Image: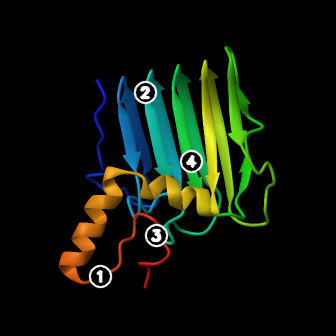
Amino acid sequence: MNATHTAETTPTTDDVARVHAHYRTIKKLGHWTTGRRFEVRARRGMVVLDLRSPQIPDGDIEVEVNLDHSMVKLLVPQDADIDHWDLSYPGRGRVKDWTGENGAGRRVRITGEIRHGEIRVHRGGIATLSAMFSREFVQDARRARREGTEPTVADPARGAN
């Protein structure tokens, strides 16, 4: 059973945004949060987290994962610094970052445990394409057209004022 859900609440900067995906797909795209701390728990599911929004306050972003046969896709700016030193792999698991190069930008610290799963890091243009090939982008584009504004799912920095 696959279902796609969008964010319904926006946590404050002190809160931990919790994403729970058991046997389903959850996508959090665009301006869905103003927090810097996230907990992702997934069992045989998929989670997409967009961490490119300028509404996320400055400082390190912390993502704690507990994955079991699951995949997490992180959409980050091109110059993000991905730190996964404290991530443990009791089963097969990996972090896939195609560029493999950390920049001097915001640091994303990933901790927790992966059992037979993976974390995919999509940067810059690939992150934009990942967001554009989603139902959320189509809904956002329709909303933006109705309201005469810019869509924010593809590139959250475009809609920031």
Residue in view at x 40 percent, y 64 percent = 153
**43 sits left or right of 60 in the view:** left
Three-letter code for the amino acid on which mark 2 is drawn? Gly
Mark whose residue sits in front, 4 or 1: 1
Q: Quadrant of residue 20?
A: top left
Spot occupied by residue 53 in the image (x, y as percentages of width and height):
49, 66
Counting residues from the start of the chain, the first of labels 2 and 4 encountered is 2
Q: What is the C-alpha distance between the residues marked 4 and 1?
A: 26 Å
Rendered image: mark on residue 74? 4
How packed is label 4: few (under 14 Cα within 10 Å), some, or many (20 or more)? many
Residue in view at x 79 percent, y 48 percent = 100
Q: Which residue is mark 1?
A: 149
Spot occupied by residue 119 in the image (x, y as percentages of width and height):
61, 36
Mark 4, secondary structure of its residue: strand
Three-letter code for the amino acid on which mark 1 is drawn? Thr
Q: Which residue is mark 3?
A: 156
Mark 3, secondary structure of its residue: loop
Give the position of the C terminus as an image quadrant.
Answer: bottom left
Mark 2, secondary structure of its residue: loop
Identity of the residue furthest to the top in this view = 91
For this rendering, which residue is in front, 78 or 60? 78
Q: What is the C-alpha distance between the residues marked 2 and 4?
A: 15 Å
Counting residues from the start of the chain, the first of labels 1 and 3 encountered is 1
Q: Quadrant of residue 126?
A: bottom right
Q: Is residue 85 shown to the viewer in this render?
A: yes
Mark 1, secondary structure of its residue: loop
Residue in view at x 39 percent, y 45 percent = 27
Q: What is the C-alpha distance between the residues marked 2 and 1?
A: 33 Å
